[in-house]
Image (cartoon, helix red, strand yellow):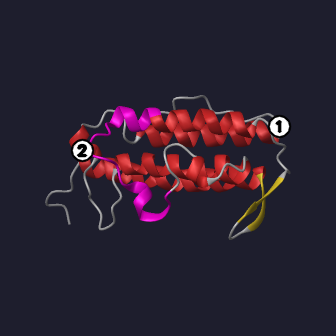
Amino acid sequence: MTYSIPLITMGDERRLLEDMLDRNRAELINTVRGLSERDARRRLVASVTTPIGLVKHAAVAERIWFQHILAGVPKHEIEGGTTAGEASFVVGEKESVDAVIAEFEGVNERSRAIAAGFDLDQLRTHPRLGEVSLRFIYLFLIEDFARHCGHGDILREQIEHPAGGIQ
């Protein structure tokens, strides 16, 4: 897959962190873009993970980290939900691939707007981890989304090139 945004290799720390998160966001979308509705919902592993579910889960993760933890919005006031765990991968029957991508992109925009009001070292309290900085949030999501991009790449490969009789 090709990157939909150029690789930024120089700049201040914040620019590099923001760019790497944006690249992982774009790559996660690329793992589902162009799949049929049926293929995007295929379960090819024992868990509830599906290509479209990965994007749905990433939107939930961003809402939790940027809207709830960073901006302090109470979870019950966050549109789109913040249910974590396995439930965050579940996509409703009436949700299309395009709608889930649009939802994720909208969450990305909101996250960028929220983060713009904070310094990298500003601290917020996470209920389990304690004090976290915006820098930590960027690094955590870069790592999390990169892992999910790998999951998405494997699922897409299974869909497009099934192993068949290969042992």
The amino acid pointed to by label 2 is Asp
Check the image and name the residue furthest to the left. Answer: 165
Front-most of residues 113 and 24: 113
Residue that label 1 marks: 12
Q: Earlier in the sequence, mark 2 or mark 1?
A: 1
Residue visible at 50% across and 50% down? 81
Q: Residue 31 at x, y = what percent? A: 40, 42
Q: Is residue 79 left or right of residue 99?
A: right
Q: Is residue 102 left or right of residue 125?
A: left
Q: Residue 96 at x, y = what percent? A: 31, 36
Q: Residue 70 at x, y = what percent? A: 73, 50
Residue that label 2 marks: 39
Q: Is residue 146 left or right of residue 91?
A: right
Q: What crowding class fits label 1: few (fewer than 14 Cα within 10 Å), some (14-19), or many (20 or more)?
A: few
In magenta segment, residue 151: no
In the image, residue 18 above or below residue 57: above
Q: Are marks 2 and 1 in contact (CB under 8 Å)?
A: no
Q: Name the mark on residue 152.
A: none
Q: Could you tell me if residue 160 is visible in this image?
A: no
Q: Is residue 141 left or right of residue 105?
A: right
Label 1 residue SS: loop
The amino acid pointed to by label 1 is Asp
Residue visible at 21% across and 56% down? 163
User: Which stretch is magenta?
Assistant: 83-102
Report how far apart the C-alphas of labels 2 and 1 lie in the structure.
Answer: 40 Å
Check the image and name the residue furthest to the front. Answer: 76
Q: Could you tell me if residue 136 is visible in this image?
A: yes
Label 2 residue SS: helix
**Numbered disc in front, either 2 or 1:** 2
